Image (cartoon, grey):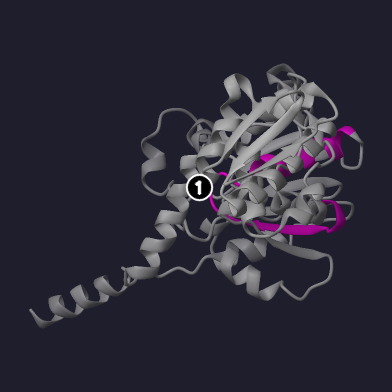
């Protein structure tokens, strides 16, 4: 057992790192098996030597983030503990990101992980960016934030958000209302992100003026999209032809972000995802970036990260299910 001490410059930074009712502190203690106390204006860490050293690095990193105005929550703590345990503490200083935009309620939106920071840098630098990663990594939300920031800065005249309505098919016809009412449920995540950034009234005003367009992918055919920030969401559900059609819509002065999760493809088994093909076809083209986010970049509830990891382990062990239908078809032929 050893004990190390950390001297914090300001008590408000210590309070921020410890969290409400010391909830962040409890995470550090539980994850590393150490004891952390605030005593005599010093932070005291006791426990096994290796665990204490990791806790010291993590707390110093959190104090540094707090000193730069970052809000410290449970997700920050777990992410920094992961970086420290992987020997990447030198990268902690890169975490404090610039504000992308401010929401309608005054909340600053920033990248929260190194992967998200690289993703935002890629969007700023390139005309086309592919954001690939599991649920909860902020692919769509950060892309919409970048779109709103570009629109407010008058870098683009329009924001166009689109996604394939893969589940539509026959069932779409059974939904009540006109075509827009039928496709709205598939576009709801995009509406939600825009409402958060702009507020409902501002969103409606820009929608009526034509500055914002939210539409299914089929509406993009035959168009040339100039001076626009275009986001294609759920791109793993595009066909090869749809993806090519979308990519050839790009006009002058436009920026494109394509987001998707190649582990959640809803296409029929005999169709290849257009996103998977695009990742191979576009990988060596200048001004196109492919950013792959991982479970470490998940910023939703911590269980989301654990669920993703559990599925990855399961899928590595289980044989692919697509082999089964071929066997059934053969047996039917025998009968």
> At which x and y percent is residue 71?
73, 29
280 sits to left or right of 270 = right
- The reply to whether residue 118 is in sight is no
Residue occupying the point 79% across, 22% down: 11
Q: Is residue 4 above or below residue 25?
A: below
In the image, residue 128 lies in the stretch drawn in magenta: yes
Residue occupying the point 54% across, 53% down: 134
Q: Is residue 312 above or below residue 94?
A: below
Outermost residue to the right:
154
Q: Which residues are magenta?
A: 124-152
> At which x and y percent is residue 43?
71, 32
Front residue of 237/130: it is: 130
> At which x and y percent is residue 79?
63, 46
Quadrant position of the C terminus in the picture: bottom left
> At which x and y percent is residue 264?
47, 56
Q: Residues within 10 Å of mark 1 (few under 14, many from 20)?
A: many
In the image, residue 292 lies in the stretch drawn in magenta: no
Q: In the rendered image, which residue does mark 1 sit on?
A: 305
Front residue of 97/1: it is: 1
């Amino acid at each position: 057992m050893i004990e190390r001490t950390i001297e914090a410059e300001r008590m408000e930074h210590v309070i921020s790192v410890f969290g409400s009712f010391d909830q962040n502190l409890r995470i550090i203690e539980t994850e590393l098996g150490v004891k952390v106390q605030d005593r005599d204006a010093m932070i005291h860490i006791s426990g096994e030597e290796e665990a204490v050293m990791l806790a010291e690095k993590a707390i110093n990193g959190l104090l540094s983030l707090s000193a730069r105005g970052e809000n410290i929550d449970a997700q920050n703590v777990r992410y920094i503990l992961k970086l420290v345990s992987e020997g990447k503490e030198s990268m902690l200083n890169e975490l404090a990101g610039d504000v992308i935009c401010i929401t309608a309620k005054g909340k600053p939106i920033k990248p929260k992980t190194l992967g998200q920071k690289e993703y935002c840098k890629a969007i700023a630098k390139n005309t086309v960016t592919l954001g690939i990663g599991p649920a909860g990594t902020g692919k769509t939300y950060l892309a919409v934030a970048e779109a709103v920031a570009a629109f407010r800065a008058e870098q683009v005249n329009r924001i166009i958000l689109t996604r394939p309505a893969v589940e539509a098919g026959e069932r779409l016809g059974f939904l009540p209302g006109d075509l827009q009412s039928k496709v709205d449920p598939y576009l709801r995540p995009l509406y939600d992100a825009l409402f958060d950034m702009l507020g409902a009234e501002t969103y409606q005003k820009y929608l009526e003026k034509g500055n914002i367009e939210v539409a299914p992918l089929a509406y993009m055919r035959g168009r040339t999209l100039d001076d626009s920030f275009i986001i294609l969401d759920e791109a793993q559900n595009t066909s090869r032809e749809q993806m090519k059609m979308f990519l050839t819509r790009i006009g002058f002065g436009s920026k494109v972000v394509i987001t998707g999760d190649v582990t959640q493809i809803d296409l029929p088994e005999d169709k290849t995802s257009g996103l998977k093909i695009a990742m191979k076809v576009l990988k060596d083209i200048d001004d196109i970036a492919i950013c792959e986010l991982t479970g470490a970049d998940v910023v939703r509830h911590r269980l989301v990260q654990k669920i993703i990891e559990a599925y990855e382990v399961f899928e590595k062990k289980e044989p692919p299910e697509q082999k089964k239908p071929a066997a059934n078809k053969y047996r039917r032929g025998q009968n």
